[in-house]
Image (spheres, helix red, strand yellow):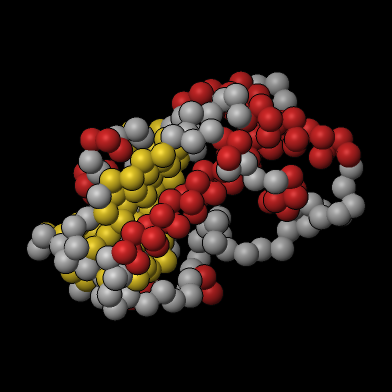
Amino acid sequence: MISLIFPKAAQFLPDVSLVLSEMGYCPPHNDHLQNLIVEKLVETCEHTEIKAGFFLLPPKSVKIDKQIYFDDQQIFDPGAIIISQMAHSTSLALLLATLGDEFDLWARSLAENDMLAAYIVDIIGSLLVEIIIDHLEIGIYLQAALRGEKCSNRFSPGYCQWLVEEQKQFFDLLPPEMQFVKLQKSSLMLPLKSVSAVIGLGRNVKKGEYHCHICTLQNCYRRKKTRFIL
């Protein structure tokens, strides 16, 4: 099953307080900064072409052992943490979202003249694409429920000890309708503001807590850090 969405950015924009929090600010903060964030949120709507979707592999096509198998062929070796989280999965959901090339060009042009504006836009872009992936995840929960299945947490190559090089296998599994992001030899995705992720589905899947306390990746979006600038 394939589900695609091409929404307007205004539907998913993060609010000002979330952007400020991600920047490390807490109240009180100056009006100039808040006004600049609002300005860039509005402009974001003019510089995005969101494309997103998920693809569900057929039921009972996936097996979880020490690696992840699809139709009896190994496709992923994400490591022990993710394998334990995806235990009993019999299918996978592949998620992909991007803000488009125009957003990258805009962000790059801002960086040439206004580093603060560029920094704000970079944060807005990262938050926006994650919010879109969150929205896709809800759709997967609904489809899983219709199939009488449960969902694992979502994971992405490059996080939680999963080698980013396995992006290649991820992209090899995508249907033609979801080829709106290009994968470089370095495993970097283009456009830059793009996210890929995998969720396990199965009748006996149990959604556990993320194991952030044993993960060493400091820039993970799941890692909660207190970073306040007064």
Whether residue 163 is visible here, answered yes or no, is: no
Q: Please report the residue visible at 89 percent of the width from the left and 42 percent of the height from the top.
A: 30
Q: Nearer the viewer, residue 8 or 161?
A: 8
Judged left or right of residue 24, residue 193 is left
Residue extending farthest front: 146
Locate residue 100, reporting x and y percent.
46, 30
Q: Nearer the viewer, residue 192 or 6?
A: 6
Which quadrant of the structure image shows residue 34? Answer: top right
Q: Please report the residue visible at 31 percent of the width from the left and 64 percent of the height from the top.
A: 146
Tell me the quarter of the image containing the C terminus.
bottom right
Q: Is residue 42 above or below residue 126?
A: above
Which quadrant of the structure image shows residue 151? Answer: bottom left
Q: Is residue 229 above or below residue 49?
A: below
Whether residue 121 is visible here, answered yes or no, is: yes
Q: Please report the residue visible at 32 percent of the width from the left and 75 percent of the height from the top.
A: 205
Judged left or right of residue 3, residue 106 is right
Locate residue 83, reporting x and y percent.
31, 71
Q: Is residue 133 above or below residue 146?
A: above
